[in-house]
Amino acid sequence: MIARGAILAGCLWLSAALADDHAVVLIYHHVSADTPAATSVTPAVFDRHLDYLDANGFTVWPLSRVIDAVAAREALPRNTVAITFDDAYRSVYTEALPRLRRRGWPFTVFVNSEAVDRGYASTMSWEQIRGLLEAGGEIGNHSHTHDHLVRRHAGESEADWRRRATRDIETAAARIEAETGIRSRLFAYPYGEYSEPLKNIVRELGYRGIAQQSGAVGYLTDLLAVPRFPLARGYDDLERFATGVNARPLPVRAVDVGASSRRAGDIERLRLVLDAGDYRPRQLACYGAGGKALPVERRADEPFEVVIDVTGIGRPGRNKVNCTAPAIDEPGAWFWYSHQWLLRNPDGSWYEG
Ligand SMILES: [Zn+2]
């Protein structure tokens, strides 16, 4: 009995040591040397990323499993990542798929169905998409048209906008289901752009919303704005990759961007309330576009509350602030939170794509 108890205790210790409360989601587009740098990594760089995950004991899960685990507040293996690809590009089939299949790793591809229907040369065919599923991949919804869904068209009413956005998401769901039999519960926002009204549509349709601002996924993550670390040429070296996959979620309890987030110039302050954790809150630093450090004012300690001055950094279109704080128990690791918001032009018109 003693031996059995010792073994049990050992197993419990082991499972506690290996359990964690977060994961990191990666987003790629093309895996090719011949496609635009801003949306591509080369096959050689992709190999280096996969080698890093392998050499450092990462567990690769499908994104749906990561989302289900954090939604249920279940423990995840230490160092869990999900590998995702947006836009169903052909190089995912020709370059990424064989590499992932060799390792037996799952992955998730977000499909914008109109591009597949039109048979673009750079896009996978439905047959290839079915091949992804057979190779251990999963697919998600990335809208039909890949439009900037947040924007309203000229003269479009709120109700018309809602109908159009809903139809776009449902058309993709129907096409994907007709071609593969799969009905995914994951929706990746085109361009990573979301707003509260769009999040509401995504929620009402029964989806989780997958975004593109950087950060790790934890129990407090808004599952209608799930962060992913983007990898593309110029931002894909191994040091940055390691920082990304080792990131942990800053436990942001509440976020407030003020009354309005509609026009450039409107947002001036971003307020964050954070739970305590294994990070150093007083070393929280926040950065705007281009890595510009932003003034962070501490308002309270318990719970830790800061106000970040973003006066003047907001531009029409997508805006982001990245906040990081060093981990206490793991030198070199960062707790991370990124906030994205969209602004219209100062005259209230919508930004161009
Ligand atoms: Zn896309």
Image: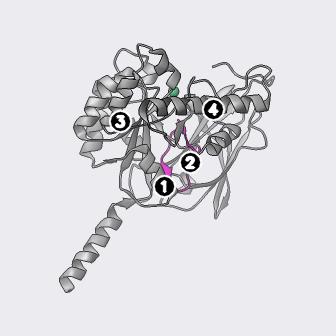
| Amino acid bearing label 3 | Leu
Q: How far apart are the alpha carbons under marks 1 and 2?
A: 9 Å
Q: How far apart are the alpha carbons under marks 4 and 2?
A: 20 Å
Residue 104 vs 353, above or below: the answer is below
Residue 248, can we see it? Answer: no
Residue that badge 4 annotates = 319
Front residue of this view, candidates 132 and 217: 132
The kind of secondary structure element at disc 2 is loop
Instruction: Name the disc covering residue 223, or none.
Output: 2
Residue that badge 1 annotates = 70
Instruction: Name the disc covering residue 133, or none.
Output: 3
Residue 348, can we see it? Answer: yes
Label 2 near label 1: C-beta < 8 Å? yes
Q: Sequence order check: which comes first, mark 2 or mark 3?
A: 3
The kind of secondary structure element at disc 1 is helix
Q: Sequence order check: which comes first, mark 1 or mark 2?
A: 1
Q: What is the magenta range?
A: 207-224
Where residue 71 sits: x, y (%)?
51, 55
Q: Sequence order check: which comes first, mark 4 or mark 3?
A: 3
| Amino acid bearing label 2 | Leu
| Amino acid bearing label 4 | Asn
Instruction: Tell me what residue is drawn at x 78 percent, y 39 percent.
Output: 260
Q: Sequence order check: which comes first, mark 4 or mark 1?
A: 1
Q: Quadrant of the C terminus?
A: top right
Label 3 near label 4: C-beta < 8 Å? no
Ligand 1 is within 8 Å of the C-beta of the residue at disc 1 = no
Label 1 near label 4: C-beta < 8 Å? no
Q: How far apart are the alpha carbons under marks 2 and 3?
A: 24 Å
